[in-house]
Amino acid sequence: MRINTNVSSLTAQNANTQNNKSVASSLEKLSTGLRINKASDDASGLAIADKLRTQASSLSQSVKNGNAAITLTQIADKAMSEQSNILDIIKTKLIQASTATTTSAGVTAISQDIQKLGAQLDNIAKNTNYNGMTLLQASAGSTATAGTRIFQLGEFSGDTIEITSGQVQANLSGLGLVSAGNLSIGTNSDASALLDDMDTALTNLNTMRSVFGSTQTQVQSKVRNLETTVTNLKAAESIIRDVDYAAESANFNKLNIISQAGTYAISQANNVQQNVMRLLQ
């Protein structure tokens, strides 16, 4: 019997130390809700989970970009809807002015109304914007064609949807009516001559509206797909990173019991040494 080195006690202490580390790790998982709290918990799992998280974050921002793009197209569409109403009113007034029962004084009054309506149509094109970005023409100070609008809807540089430059110029000039002054009429014949121009303007405006409408449909479809992808990515990350509370609670209880048993084993190993005293009595 040896007393200089209590091997049994050292063995029990080492086992108890290792078990206490496991208890601390289990408690950390239960406290944070995460199975992986540091790289040593699962190095490969952490790498995969982090990549999934980054991908989900990128696509979540893309969803926000898409929703902003939808709002932009809705603003443009509502503005052009009002422009369409203006053109309808102008055409109705032109028909009124075209008939012989409308006197020259009446034609003059109608002409003033039409020019004001035309000016309002131009104002809509000038002032319709999203976050300061003019949508229906190049800028507030330029009636040229609006520039290309590119929406980033994915994690890679090529994941974009755009409104192509050269398709949107929803002002009198872009609609083929040149300016409000060109809507001036002095006779019934002048009014009649503008009727075909109004039909052309309405057709042009509807074509421009379709640019925003088709883009909105495309973006909405993309956003729905992105939302589904984000949900699946987060679910995949959760499987890897999050703790299973039922399993970990059972493991924690088991480790606690082992820890208590280990403490008892240490005390018993130390008690064995007391037997030496009996030999010396």
Image (cartoon, rainbow, N blue to C red):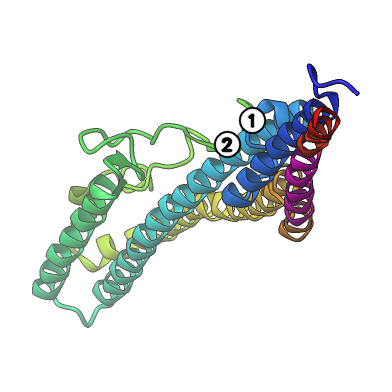
Expressed as whole percent of the image width and height from the top left, the position of residue 138 reads 33, 34
For numbered disc 1, what is the local secondary structure?
loop
Residue 100 seen from this side? yes
Query: Which residue is at the far top?
Result: 4
Amino acid type, callout 1? Lys
User: 19 or 197: nearer the eye?
Assistant: 19
For numbered disc 2, what is the local secondary structure?
helix
User: In what quadrant of the picture does the N terminus appear?
Assistant: top right
Q: Is residue 254 magenta?
A: yes
Q: Residue at x 65, y 46 (%)?
A: 29
**From the viewer's perspective, is 9 left or right of 90?**
right
Separation of disc 2 and disc 1 at Cα? 23 Å
Q: Is residue 36 magenta?
A: no
| Magenta segment boundaries in residue numbering | 252-268
* Quadrant of res 42: top right
Judged by its main secondary structure, the magenta piece is helix
Amino acid type, callout 2? Ser
Query: Which residue is at the far left?
Result: 105
- Residue that carries the numbered disc 1 in the rendered image: 38
The mark lying in front, picked from 2 and 1, is 1
Query: Which residue is at the far front?
Result: 281
- Residue that carries the numbered disc 2 in the rendered image: 58
* Quadrant of res 84: bottom left
